[in-house]
Structure formats: C-alpha cells, structure tokens
Image (cartoon, grey):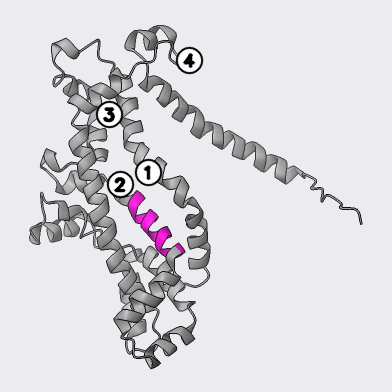
Amino acid sequence: MTNKKRSYKLDSFDIVNIILLTILMLMVLIPFYYTIVISFMEQQEFIMGGFTLWANKPTIANYKDIVLYGGIGKAFYNSVVNTILGVCFSMFVTTTLAYGLSKKNYPGRTFIQNFVIFPMFFGGGLIPFFLTVKGLGLMNTRWAVIIPIGLSIFNAIILRNFFEQLPKDLEEAAIIDGASPLRIFIQIHLPLIKPALATIILFYAVDRWNEWFYSSLFLGDNDLWPMQVVLRQILYATEGMKKNIPPEARRDTFSEGIKAATVLLTMAPIMVVYPFLQKYFVKGIMIGAIKS
C-alpha cells in the first residue's frame, strides 16, 4: 500500500484570511519589538537614529532608573500580593457557587441562578459601587481591590458546566461509602476538573495583575499602588519620576526608554506564566460553552 499525502488546496477565502492574520500579527509584533528596542536605547541614539532594528550600544540604564527610583519594587510586591490573594478569594467564591448551581435537585435553584446572572447585564453604576466600598470601610486597604471584584459570573458559569458534566455515579458511590458533601467536593469533584480550574485561575490571575481602574479609585495611599497604576503614572508623568533620581545618576535620563522599560517589566510576569497554561484557555472556553 502506498501512503498518499493529503493535499490541501488554498482557496481565495483562505488566502484572504492568511493576509489579514499576517497584517494583524505584524501590527502587534512590530510595536512590541520596537518597545523592547527603545527600552535598551540611550536618548542620544534615539534622537539621532530613529527607528532601528537594535540599539547600537545597549544599556540597562532605563531599567535601573525604574527599579531604583521609580518605585516599581514596592508596586511589584503589591501586584504579587493582590494577585495571589485575589485569585485565592475568587477561586473559593467561584468554585463553591458553581458547585451549588450545578446541583439541580435543591429548591430555588432557578431563582438563585437568575439572581446571580442578572448583574451580568444590569449593574448598579459606579457611584453606588464606590459608596458601598466606602461604607464597608475598605477604602485605602488592599481588600478594596480583592473582595468587591472577587467574583466573575462568566467564570462561575464555565465551572458550573464542568461540574454538570461529571458522572453522577461517582457522587452516588461516595455517598454510599459515607463521604460528606464537603469531602466529595474537595477529594472527588475538584481533582476531576483540573483543566477547568487552571483555566479560571489563569483568567483571574491575568485580570488581577492588569487591574488598575479600581486601584486608582479606591487606593489613595501610594504605598498600596500596584504596578499598573505606577505604570500609568510614569507614562503620563515621567518628569515627576526624574525628580527622584539624584544628579549623579541622571545620565541624560531617557523618558521614552523609561516608559518602554516600565511597560516590559509590567508585562513580564504574565508573559512568563501564560505559555505554560495557554492550552487551558481554549479547552476551558470550549467545554464551558457547551451549556449555558
């Protein structure tokens, strides 16, 4: 028997898609690469050379200024703490809610489910939300950016669909063996949905790491600002950061280089983690979208 290679003929639709996707890819990669180049350039080379494929005399002075004088170290610590605490709290609330909604034999399930889904489409507005956070005494505390935004209904629906697809025989066998509902939840159901849990953890981690709006709204204390807020301050007020740099270290401080270096330092943690969990994005969304 001869093995025949399956040939695929490109039609006009495929060609158009390839061209469009290539253009979109270049629109993302070129600015990103140029940001990397600028972060290693000096001001004089940037002014004289303009666009270049790489810096002739690479320097880490921009990163040095950010780390030593830009307050990025404390902001990095705040972002890490907020992300870890936020993901743990969000996963606890999301998994317990999704597990409860997956049970179809308790009274009031439909009402509770509709009550939970309603805020996805209709919100109370920013001012009532702000007054609620202030009334709870969370202003200028780390919990102001953890508890109020701790639940995503979209993520809860994805997990609910995972729970609903688990075999009922496993739970019935565990009940016959005398396992409690909490033990069934922790030792049987959660291990079976590890791909879904990885997906939701990644969703929450990216969201918490990139969060800046509520941090700038609820956190007036600069010592509590995460990296995204500090990045925003640097992008719009680089001259203010220069005042923190002593004269002996000024070295013709390069504003554009500082901004580029700050952007890359802010993106680096997620860029490192994302490739290892990327496959769970597609798997989680596809399985979670089977039912709604």
* Residue extending furthest toward the front: 177
* Labels 1 & 4 near each other (Cβ < 8 A): no
**Is residue 113 something that shows in the picture?**
no
Discs 2/3, front: 2
Percent coordinates x, y for residue 155 in the rendering: 38, 64
Q: Which residue is pictured at 60% across the width and 40% down the height?
A: 21
User: Which is nearer the N-term, disc 2 or disc 1?
Assistant: 2
Q: Which residue is pictured at 32% across the width and 36% down the height?
A: 266
Q: Nearer the viewer, residue 219 or 160?
A: 160
Q: Around disc 1, counting alpha carbons within 10 Å, would you say few (fewer than 14), some (14 to 19), or many (20 or more)? A: some
Percent coordinates x, y for residue 249 in the rendering: 19, 13
Discs 3/4, front: 4
| Residue matched to label 2 | 209
* Labels 2 & 1 near each other (Cβ < 8 A): yes
In the rendered structure, which segment of residues is drawn in magenta? 195-206
Residue 52, which numbered label? 4
Picture quarter containing residue 24? top right
Q: Nearer the viewer, residue 6 or 186?
A: 186
